[in-house]
Image (cartoon, rainbow, N blue to C red):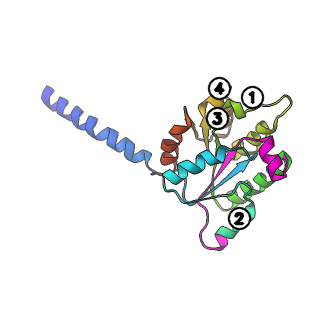
Amino acid sequence: MKKTLLGLLLVLFCFLPFSSAFSQNKPMAKEPVLLTSCGQSPGPVIIKVVLQKLNIPFDYNPLATAADLQKKKSAGLPYGSVIIVMGASLKGMGAAGISIEDEIKRISQLIQEAKKENITIIGGHVEGMKRRAQGAAAGDTTDEQSIEAVAPNSDIMLINKEGNTDGRFTTIAQSKKIPLIEVEKNVELLQALSKIYGK
């Protein structure tokens, strides 16, 4: 009897991890990906490198608009998901000749079109607390405005845990029932995006 029970436990032990891993590979989002920014920070470049390593087809356009989603759909190759990286850079916006108001208007229209086309929206914040208002110049709330425009409207949030020490993203995720994926370090983005896209 004991041997039989032990045998069953061994079988379960062997198969459960495999079943768990298999279920985790179910994609949470589809390809191809439109990668863009809300605030013109360098954050999207980090995501870009990871997408390349995973061989996930994507287009990177830091100034992507709703029209880009429409054009892709009209061409018969609609985007499966859009990754909007939160994080405002005054330097980046200055170089692009735009303001945070311009960015929020563009992203709001992009999000509206994505929802209309049933495109999964992934809100990412990968630069940690140094990109948050706590690390910004006095009176600079652009990063927080970027977060407010994207995070509550996301279907999935992908966050560097160090940038969530005040629980800002957790609060939004819980109130809006949005899956929250946190990484300790950006090297873990490979595993996180692999999980999201079932790679």
Gap in Å between the C-alphas at discs 4 and 2? 35 Å
> Residue type at mark 4?
Thr
16 or 132, which lies in front? 132
Which residue lies at the image location 13% right of the left edge and 29% below the top edge?
Answer: 3
Q: Is residue 80 magenta?
A: yes
Please name the residue that numbered disc 2 is placed on: 68
Which residue lies at the image location 82% right of the left edge and 35% below the top edge?
Answer: 141
Nearest to N terminus: mark 2 or mark 3: 2
Q: Position of residue 86 (x, y in %)?
A: 70, 43
Nearest to N terminus: mark 1 or mark 2: 2
**Res. 135 mark:** 1
Region in magenta: 73-99
Which residue lies at the image location 70% right of the left edge and 67% below the top edge?
Answer: 70
131 or 68, which lies in front? 131
Please name the residue that numbered disc 3 is placed on: 174
Gap in Å between the C-alphas at discs 1 and 2? 33 Å
> Residue type at mark 1?
Gly
Q: Is residue 129 above or below residue 47?
A: above
Q: Nearer the viewer, mark 1 or mark 2?
A: 1
**Res. 165 mark:** 4
Nearest to N terminus: mark 1 or mark 3: 1
> Residue type at mark 2?
Asp
